[in-house]
């Protein structure tokens, strides 16, 4: 199956274009824009980890190493498309236009963090694994019924493909011919479980066969491959050619979340070796090969990103603290006795009574 679903590349690890089919579509402006967004979301990610370590936000899910998958796919969207992220896809959401302040508010426990800008169709992050897939199909089908050309993209990890919602989502998308792109970021681990211990299939892309939908396996660290193959999948969706499953093979350098210790289950030396395939290093090499790179350009993007992130942090920290009982307030229309007991116990602890 790995031979049937080879990993598609446009740019190799040294920044050379190896697929001439896309060469004439790669402009300096496009590449520079990719580079700017990649730098921005990495700076945000590292800053967010620092904030968590300082106790200024709660548990955080880092994505360093997966930036090309998130930026390339998000930039392939049109403004009126839908985005359904998992808890690790804030790089994609900010690239698509989400508020950095609200993303930070989400990680600081405030409901406002789930609210996108009024002109963006960004679903709240899917915390339970794979639950956002059927939602993405429903939104896509609604757009189809309305007669628009808007599509949905939904993000999920390799572990999500072992959940029922994954199969239900692909099945109903196939039946309805829904304009949806299933974007899988395969970083080889579902928390601490390596992919070979959760599935027997050699690829995730092949799982589309059961539902008679199109699929492709791409190098998730090659931003050009991510962008062009996602754009093709979205065009297929808009043209009523059905859904697509994309398997973006990538790697996350750090922990599953800041509550996790990856050294317990993964060789971190191997992880550091993966930096040779780093998505930002790769596009820097491409820009250098094209004589489009300069240290001053990199510095400009870094300074602008740091300023934007610092501003978002200041705005987040100016908000009132999250209200702990809010987590119990919206579970049911009328709280059950069990929910009330849990709320009262928490408030008792916070008051120092137990």
Image: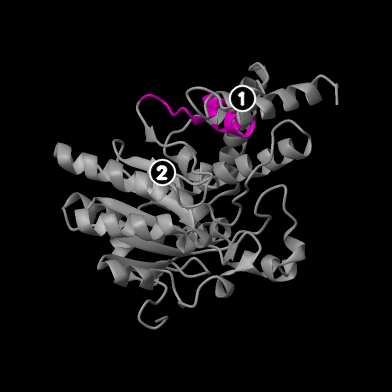
Judge whether residue 26 can be spotted in this image. Answer: no
User: Which region of the structure is painted magenta?
Assistant: 103-118
What residue is shown with label 2? 84
Side of 173 relative to 83 (left or right): left
Depth order, front residue of 39/112: 112
Q: Quadrant of residue 243?
A: bottom left
Q: Is 332 placed above or below 175 here? A: above
Q: Are marks 2 and 1 in contact (CB under 8 Å)?
A: no
Q: Position of residue 47 (x, y in %)?
A: 68, 39
Quadrant containing the N terminus is bottom left
114 part of magenta stretch: yes
Judge whether residue 326 can be spotted in this image. Answer: yes
**Marks 2 and 1, how far apart at CA:** 26 Å
Q: Is 84 placed above or below 65 here? A: above
Quadrant containing the C terminus is top right
Disc 2 element = strand
Q: Quadrant of residue 142?
A: top left
10 Å crowding of disc 1: few (<14), some (14-19), many (20+) = some
Depth order, front residue of 180/96: 180
What residue is shown with label 1? 311
Residue ID at (49%, 47%): 86
Disc 1 element = helix
Residue ID at (47%, 54%): 156
């Amino acid at each position: 199956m790995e031979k049937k679903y080879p990993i598609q590349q446009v740019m190799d690890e040294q920044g050379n274009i190896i697929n001439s089919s896309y060469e004439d579509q790669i402009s300096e402006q496009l590449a520079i824009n990719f580079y700017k967004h990649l730098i921005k979301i990495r700076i945000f990610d590292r800053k967010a980890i620092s904030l968590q370590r300082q106790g200024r936000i709660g548990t955080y899910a880092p994505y360093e190493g997966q930036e090309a998958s998130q930026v390339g796919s998000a930039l392939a969207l049109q403004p009126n498309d839908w985005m359904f992220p998992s808890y690790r896809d804030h790089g994609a959401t900010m690239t698509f236009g989400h508020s950095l302040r609200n993303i930070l508010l989400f990680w600081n426990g405030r409901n406002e963090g789930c609210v996108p800008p009024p002109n963006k169709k960004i679903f709240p992050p899917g915390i339970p694994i794979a639950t956002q897939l059927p939602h993405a199909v429903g939104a896509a089908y609604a757009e189809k019924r309305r007669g628009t050309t808007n599509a949905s993209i939904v993000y999920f990890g390799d572990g999500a493909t072992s959940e029922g919602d994954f199969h239900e989502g692909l099945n109903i998308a196939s039946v309805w011919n829904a304009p949806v792109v299933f974007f899988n970021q395969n970083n080889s681990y579902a928390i601490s479980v390596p992919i070979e211990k959760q599935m027997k299939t050699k690829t995730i892309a092949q799982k589309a066969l059961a539902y008679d939908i199109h699929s492709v396996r791409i190098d998730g660290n090659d931003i050009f491959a991510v962008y062009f193959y996602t754009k093709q999948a979205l065009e297929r969706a808009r043209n009523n050619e059905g859904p697509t499953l994309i398997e973006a093979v990538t790697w996350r350098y750090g922990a599953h979340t800041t509550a996790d210790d990856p050294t317990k289950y993964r060789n971190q030396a191997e992880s550091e070796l993966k930096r040779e395939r780093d998505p930002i290093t790769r596009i820097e090499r491409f820009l250098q090969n094209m004589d489009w790179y300069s240290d001053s350009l990199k510095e400009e993007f870094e300074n602008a990103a740091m300023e934007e992130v610092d501003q978002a942090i200041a705005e987040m920290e100016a908000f009132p603290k999250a209200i702990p009982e809010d987590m119990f307030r919206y579970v049911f229309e009328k709280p059950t006795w069990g929910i009330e007991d849990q709320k009262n116990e928490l408030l008792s602890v916070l008051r120092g009574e137990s």
